Image (tube, helix red, strand yellow):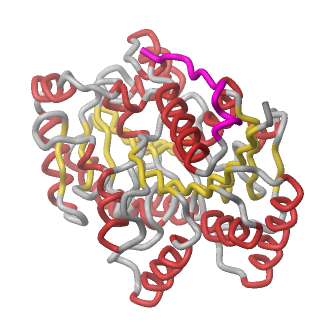
Amino acid sequence: MAETKVVHLITKLELGGAQRNTLLTVEKLPDYGFVASIWYGPGGILSSRAEALPRHHELSHLQRAIHPARDHSALEELTTLLRRLRPQILHTHSSKAGFLGRLAAFRCGIPIVVHSVHGFPFSPLQSYLRRHLFAGAEKMAARWTSHFVFVSRSDRDTAISMGLCKDNHSLIRSGFPLNPYLPRENWRRASRRRFGIADNTILIGTIAPFKPQKGLFQWMEVVREVCRRNPDTSFFLAGDGLLRNQLEKAVHEAGLTDRVLMPGFLHDLDRVMDAFDLGLSTALWEGLPQSLVQMRLKRIPLVVSDIPGNNEVIRHEENGFLSPQQDTRAYIRHLEALIKNPELRKRLGSAEEDFSLWDGDNMVRAQADLYIRLLRQKGFSSDVQDFSPPIVP
């Protein structure tokens, strides 16, 4: 049987859900008979994980920021690589890699081009020019796309309303191994000792890269007021990025360096999350962050912005609270209701959930099944007829 080659392309292997599920997919696709490669731009904290794979390539010119000369060089490199490898499937992730990759695939005549939307790059909160530039790029790239994969229903609905796709789309949740995110009391004790958190402290956790869309300066306003009014409360912000210096300055100026922990990127969040009593997200726009699902698996009640993606995980007053976007007082009010009421924390935290669609094995299986279907539609049935995907309970 001829090899069926799949390339996954992503802009940068940061420590995020999209990057982790892309790596997981490439690691597990060989179980389904595919020859899988991952291509990515430089500088990501997860690049070492990609380098451990048998087929990987770092694209030296691929970067998130718009830079015409470097973008042209990245496009040329992608075109050269695709012509050399001739994969049957190119699967792109993230905005820059999604645009350049789909354009290169069109130039090379790649039979099947799949694009995963982990959240769109445009938002009503951006400037008119920026918003329409990014939306226009997505509309152009849609012409070169065989199939879309969405991690959230809201992004799927946005794409359909914009005319990016019709029936050529699937909803496949952003998966990860679920078992490590089940609550463990011994991990709670160990994590609290590790970070010097007292047993009686209410610890409020946030997992986010330090990007403008995460609303972290509003997060800081919430932190300042909640700490002022609740002396036994501390905050934990796991992540890193370009806004670190500004956030550290804001924490210092508020006199909260002993109550706000910013440990950077952490590879063992499955253990660290057990230290949290509450979760908080002030994001301005999202795809559908894995961290919310992970904290709910840990039975942590959450206070999050009421935006598409977030409200597919959090049900208001059932497993957490949805706060109107940019309403600082609402975040404070909901957090204080949970801080002051242990029974409410317990009730919201213990709400029943079914996150089986986020299981990493189920995610990879769904993508493999999608590839097989698309290959057969293109007449590659002889290449895939012997595939026997394992059954995932």
Q: Determine whether 77 is above or below 273 in the image.
A: below
- From this viewpoint, is residue 73 visible? yes
Q: Nearer the viewer, residue 370 or 37?
A: 370
Tell me where residue 386 appears, x and y as whole percent: 66, 24
| Horizontal side, residue 81 vs residue 234: left or right | right
Q: Determine whether 171 is above or below 273 in the image.
A: below
Q: Could you tell me how many numbered marks the image carries?
A: 0
| Horizontal side, residue 177 vs residue 298: left or right | right
Q: Nearer the viewer, residue 123 or 85?
A: 85
Tell me where residue 26 appears, x and y as whole percent: 68, 37
Q: Is residue 390 magenta?
A: yes
Which residue is located at x 24 percent, y 26 percent? 353
Q: Hey, which residue is sitting farthest bottom in the picture?
A: 129
Q: Is residue 144 magenta?
A: no
| Horizontal side, residue 48 vs residue 352: left or right | right
Which residue is located at x 49 percent, y 16 percent? 391
Which residue is located at x 50 percent, y 43 percent? 238
| Horizontal side, residue 107 vs residue 295: left or right | right
Q: Nearer the viewer, residue 78 or 178?
A: 78
Per the picture, the main secondary structure of the magenta-coloured stretch is loop
Q: Quadrant of residue 340?
A: top left
Q: Nearer the viewer, residue 92 or 283?
A: 92
The part of the chain drawn in magenta is 381-393
